[in-house]
Structures are given as structure tokens and as C-alpha cells.
């Protein structure tokens, strides 16, 4: 595995100096705070140079961007084990697990709050207008580094690996659909030896998909992802698969290698939850595709905030009284004590709807089951 050399901290002294500056600028920068702990400092002194460089890369986003809250990204699926003295403290500071071990469970049977008929029907809460419902998970493959450490060739080879999964889905009448890729033909040819990228789309088609919330935006414009190396080599190895009915989408090459999501308009959350679970099982059953996991933290994600389930289950709901000032500040204040997160209609760092529509979801990802999130 190679290491990026752009502005890397090459010694403990340099890494510590950067952490002190970031911590003084923002005492809530969890990455910087953790690096300065005495136990972590002692552990860093035992690391070989290559591992210290890897730790520096994990910490780079938070040290470059002092306003970060969490401030670090894993760059390899093994980081949560081989850099555990750092990541365990970060995860405890963020998730407050108290030594818990994550368990995966999609079964709704016996989950507290589940209605007797097993149907999570939002009409029973008094909602009379169909809602936009979405459940998504982040996943990464064991065969590649995480996006922060992927080379351009890694990104293209990862995309080519996923084409087998997309072909299986396209051949299934429950899915069908198309793949939309942004990898330029010259890069595709250079890496794969094939004449051209069979799924390449135009700039106009890309913008059309972004406007329809089917494709993700230019990651290179995000300073946090850019510092982490996650946005490198844009737009190589980036794109999405979309089912024929538009309700199932897989982003590839984003913050995690895969963001897999189901969406629908309606009232019964089971419909998107069950479809996602079935699709995940179909994808991972394909030879050569194995999702990275941690014995402590469940499914591995680049950002420690998404560890565990990697899941976000959300609905779009209008809250005009809480957004009358044109912002989501009051909605966030009301939602936080309830364990809920508020985002814009297009996700994090996007605006709310003109009618006061917000994206509302449970905040927890780790030390909670998939079934508990959706209920």
C-alpha cells in the first residue's frame, strides 16, 4: 500500500504541533483532542514510520479543518483494529459506547415500539400526505483500501469490480436499471485496457442526475473530504447505479466506496427497509464482493460516525412552524433531545425546502440494530 505525501506530518512532533493548533482553535475537535492525550502520545512513539504516516492521513482532515467536530477518517478497513488506541478513544468520545460491541440484526421481531401488525405505517401517527422515505447504508469492500487511500487505479478497478454486481441487479426484473459512470474514457482505457468506458455519461447528464438527487455532487469542492484524500482523482471511479423504477440507487466512489439506498413515496417504512435488506444480500452473494466489518464496530465506514449499521433511515416532513425563519436551527434544537438529526432535502450541508420540508432521521448508527433504527 502506498501513502499520499501531500503535506503529511512526518513525525510525532509535527503531528502534535498541528493537533495543538487545531485544539486551541476548536476544543471540540475530537481528532485533535485525542491525539494530545498522554496515552495516545505514548502509543504513537511505538509506531513504525509507515503506521505513523497512516495515522497522520487519518487525522489530516481534522488538522487541516479546525472547525471539524469529529475530524478523522479511516483510510483502510483494518484501521479500527491496527490503530485502535486512537480510534477506540474517538469512537467512545463520539458514540459513548462504554465498551459495548456492535451487533447486526435486521429482524423486526420483538423490537420495542413495533406495532402488533408489524407494519411501520406513518398514517397511524396522523400523517395524511405521502412522505418521501429513504433508507441508506454505507459499505466498503475488503479487497480495497478505503477511499482516503485509494489510488486512481484502485478507484477504477473498484468500479469495474462492482459492474458484476450491477449486471446481476440489471438482470433481475425487480431491479433492472442502468449504470451511470463519470470515469473518463482515457483513464478507463489506461487502467482496464478496454477501449472505452461502457457507462460513461455526459456533463449534462451528470447535472441532470444531481438535480434529481440521484447522483452526488462534486466531492472535490468539499474541503473536509479533499483533505482526507476521499475526493482525490475526481471524477474517476465515481458514478451510480439506478433501478428501472428509480427507487433503488447505489452510489460508488463517494465517502464510502458504496452508498446503497432505497427510497419511495408512501407511508409504510417496511417497504424501503425490506427492499434494501434483500438487495444487500443479493449484492454480497456475488463472488468477489465482501463487505468490510470490524469485530467491535460492525460495518466499517470511512467516518467513525457511520460505523455499526452504516444506516440512515429518513423521511422528508414539512415543519413550517419550526422553519419560519428560513433555517433549520429550531428544528435541530427540537430534534436533538429526541435522538433525531435534521438535514436539508439533499442531505448534509444542503438547504431545507421552501415549504419548510426537512430530512429527519435517527442520529444513532452504532450500538443499535438496523431494526431499532427504522422503528
Image: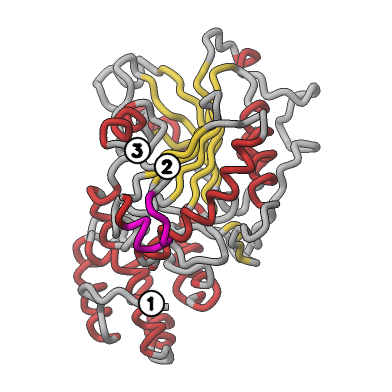
Q: Which residue is mark 3?
A: 201
Q: Nearer the viewer, residue 18 or 243?
A: 243
Residue drawn at x 47%, y 69% as measured from the top left: 76
Q: Is residue 77 left or right of residue 205?
A: right
Q: Residues within 10 Å of mark 2 (few under 14, many from 20)?
A: some
**Can residue 194 be seen by looking at this rendering?**
yes
Where is mark 2, residue-wise? 199
Residue in the foreground of this view, choosing between 171 and 82: 171
Vertical relation: 321 (above or below) 346: above
Give percent across and percent down for residue 349: 30, 39
- Neighbour class for label 1 at 10 Å: few (<14), some, many (≥20)? many
Quick one: SS at disc 2? loop
Alpha carbons under labels 3 and 1: distance apart: 35 Å
In the picture, the disc for residue 120 is none
Q: Is residue 132 left or right of residue 276?
A: left
In magenta, the rendered stretch is 187-196
Binning the other alpha carbons within 10 Å of mark 3 as few (below 14), some (14 to 19) or many (20 upward) gives some
Name which residue lies at 52% across and 67% down.
77
Residue 189 part of the magenta-drawn span: yes
Q: Is residue 151 above or below residue 208?
A: below
Task: Kindly state the secondary structure of the residue where label 3 is placed.
Answer: loop
Location of residue 143 (image quadrant): bottom right
Q: Which residue is mark 1?
A: 54
Which x, y percent locates residue 265?
54, 18
Q: Are marks 2 and 3 in contact (CB under 8 Å)?
A: yes
Q: CA distance from mark 2 to mark 1?
A: 34 Å
Amino acid at each position: 500500500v502506498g501513502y499520499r505525501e501531500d503535506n503529511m506530518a512526518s513525525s510525532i512532533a509535527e503531528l502534535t504541533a498541528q493537533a495543538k493548533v487545531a485544539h486551541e482553535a476548536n476544543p471540540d475537535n475530537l481528532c485533535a483532542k485525542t491525539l494530545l492525550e498522554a496515552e495516545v502520545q505514548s502509543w504513537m512513539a511505538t509506531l513504525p514510520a509507515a503506521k505513523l504516516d497512516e495515522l497522520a492521513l487519518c487525522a489530516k482532515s481534522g488538522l487541516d479543518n479546525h472547525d471539524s467536530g469529529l475530524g478523522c477518517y479511516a483510510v483502510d478497513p483494518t484501521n479500527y483494529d491496527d490503530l485502535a488506541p486512537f480510534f477506540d478513544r474517538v469512537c467512545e468520545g463520539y458514540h459513548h459506547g462504554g465498551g459495548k460491541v456492535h451487533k447486526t440484526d435486521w429482524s423486526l421481531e420483538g423490537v420495542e415500539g413495533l406495532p402488533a401488525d408489524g407494519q411501520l405505517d406513518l398514517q397511524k401517527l396522523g400523517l395524511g400526505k405521502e412522505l418521501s422515505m429513504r433508507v441508506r447504508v454505507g459499505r466498503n469492500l475488503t479487497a480495497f483500501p478505503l477511499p482516503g487511500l485509494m489510488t486512481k487505479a484502485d478507484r477504477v478497478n473498484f468500479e469495474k469490480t462492482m459492474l458484476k454486481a450491477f449486471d446481476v441487479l440489471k438482470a433481475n426484473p425487480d431491479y433492472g436499471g442502468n449504470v451511470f459512470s463519470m470515469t473518463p474514457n482515457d483513464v478507463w482505457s489506461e487502467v482496464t485496457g478496454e477501449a472505452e468506458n461502457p457507462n460513461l455519461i455526459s456533463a449534462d447528464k451528470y447535472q441532470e442526475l444531481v438535480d434529481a438527487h440521484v447522483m452526488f455532487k462534486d466531492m472535490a469542492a468539499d474541503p473536509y473530504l479533499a483533505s482526507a484524500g476521499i475526493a482525490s482523482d475526481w471524477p474517476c471511479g465515481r458514478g451510480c447505479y439506478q433501478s428501472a423504477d428509480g427507487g433503488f440507487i447505489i452510489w460508488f466512489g463517494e465517502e464510502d466506496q458504496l452508498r446503497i439506498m432505497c427510497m419511495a413515496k408512501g407511508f409504510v417504512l417496511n417497504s424501503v427497509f425490506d427492499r434494501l435488506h434483500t438487495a444487500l444480500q443479493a449484492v454480497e452473494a456475488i463472488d468477489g464482493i465482501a463487505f468490510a466489518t470490524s469485530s467491535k464496530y460492525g460495518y466499517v465506514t470511512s467516518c467513525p460516525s457511520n460505523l455499526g449499521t452504516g444506516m440512515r433511515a429518513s423521511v422528508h416532513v414539512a415543519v413550517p412552524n419550526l422553519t419560519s425563519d428560513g433555517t433549520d436551527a429550531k428544528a435541530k434544537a427540537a430534534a436533538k433531545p429526541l435522538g433525531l438529526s435534521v438535514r436539508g432535502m439533499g442531505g448534509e450541508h444542503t438547504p431545507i425546502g421552501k415549504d419548510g420540508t426537512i430530512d429527519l432521521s435517527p442520529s444513532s448508527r452504532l450500538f443499535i440494530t438496523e431494526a431499532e433504527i427504522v422503528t
